[in-house]
Image (cartoon, rainbow, N blue to C red):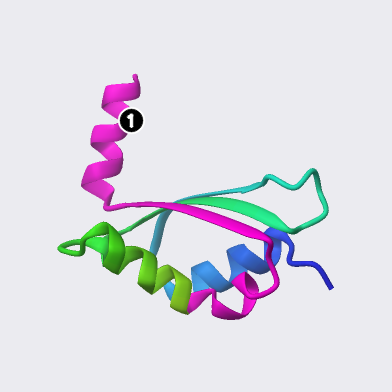
Amino acid sequence: MPVTVEDLERAIRAAFPVSHLDIEDQSSGCGSSYAIFLVSEVFEGKNTLARHRLINQALKQEISQLHAFSQKSFTPAQYAAHLAKSG
């Protein structure tokens, strides 16, 4: 059974305190490729690699069923700066 946006959202919200979350199905609906944009306070003080490891561990079961998975992770302060910059 393919992974759905709802499956990913459920797993992410169960694992992290979410300030903002975007999930994009990049596989034209077949559920094999997703990109996520996750903002969480849990990322404070962690570098990109540590953040990605946290996400990969939390989504291990879902990622194992995907062809492609990309992620961007920000702290709430980084997200606010990102919004201000992109305007």
Looking at the rendering, which quadrant does residue 83 occupy?
Answer: top left
Q: Residue 30, position in %: x, y?
A: 82, 54
On whether residue 76 falls in the magenta region, the answer is yes
Q: Hey, which residue is sitting farthest top in the picture?
A: 87
Locate residue 23 relative to residue 45 in the image: left or right: right
Would residue 45 be found to the left or right of residue 57 on screen? left
Q: Quadrant of the C terminus?
A: top left
Read off the magenta span. Answer: 58-87
Residue positioned 52% across, 52% down in the render: 36
Across and down, in percent, residue 47 comes to 21, 60
Amino acid type of the residue tagged 1 in the rendering: Leu
Q: Secondary structure at mark 1?
A: helix
Indicate whether 81 appears above or below 61. Answer: above
Q: Count of labels shown?
A: 1
Task: Identify the residue at horizontal 20%, vertical 64% (top origin).
Answer: 46
- Considering every residue shown, the one lying at the far left of the view is 45
Callout 1 crowding tier (Cα within 10 Å): few <14, some 14–19, many ≥20: few
- Residue 8, position as x, y percentages in the image: 62, 65
Q: Say if the magenta span includes residue 63.
A: yes
Query: Measured along the vertical axis of the image, is residue 59 above or below residue 71?
Result: below
**Is 58 above or below relative to 50?**
below
* Picture residue at 54% right of the left edge, 74% below the top: 59
Residue 68 location in percent, x, y? Answer: 62, 57
Residue topped by disc 1: 83
Q: Quadrant of the N terminus?
A: bottom right
Residue found 28% across the figure and 58% down from its top: 48
Along the horizontal axis of the image, is 46 left or right of 40?
A: left
Closer to us: 49 or 54: 49
- Compared across the picture, whether 9 is left or right of 18 comes to right
